[in-house]
Image (cartoon, helix red, strand yellow):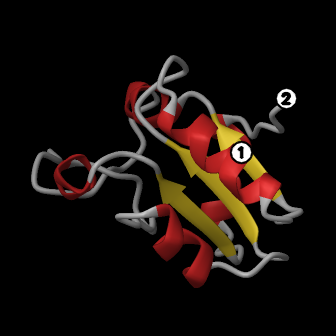
Amino acid sequence: MDIATIGRDELKAKLDAGADVKLVMSLQRWAFEALHIPGSLHFDTPEELLEALEPDDEIIVYCSDPACVGSRFAYKKLVDRGYTNVRRYAGGLSDWQEAGYPLEGTAAD
């Protein structure tokens, strides 16, 4: 399956512009509470994810880094359920942090 992606700079521009984007972190709750991109959503189960988001929402999923599979699974779950505007921010937290962009959570600087 080809995965549609979004790069760091495009994501930052969307967030800075206040775009109506559902940014979903696909890691465990403890990881989300420790560190996440501001404005991110978190769901404990795939069912919560599907209940909270509309099929035509602009959804961007991410996790820790390009090797992390959480965002791949979330992407596939959404697309398989008919969500049409889904992309993966493959760089994830590590890429965002490397750029010096802001993070929120108990472990944020």
Specify the quadrant that holds the C terminus: top left
Q: Nearer the viewer, residue 84 or 90?
A: 84
Query: Which residue is at 67% across, 52% downward?
Result: 77
Tag 2 secondary structure: loop
Q: Which mark is residue 64?
A: none
Q: Marks 2 and 1: CB-CB under 8 Å?
A: yes
Q: Quadrant of residue 91?
A: top right
Whether residue 12 can be seen here: no
Residue sitting farthest toward the top:
67
Instruction: Decide: few, some or many residues near mark 2? Use Cα within 10 Å; few <14, some 14-19, many ≥20.
Output: few
Q: Quadrant of residue 59?
A: bottom right
Q: Is residue 3 above or below residue 17?
A: above
Q: Is residue 20 above or below residue 41?
A: below
| Residue 44 location (% of width, % of height) | 35, 64
For badge 1, the amino acid type reads: Lys
| Residue 6 location (% of width, % of height) | 75, 40
Q: Is residue 2 left or right of residue 63?
A: right
Q: Quadrant of residue 53?
A: bottom right
Tag 1 secondary structure: helix
Q: Is residue 99 left or right of residue 13?
A: left
Specify the quadrant that holds the N terminus: top right
Residue at numbered disc 2: 1
C-alpha distance separating marks 2 and 1: 8 Å
For badge 2, the amino acid type reads: Met
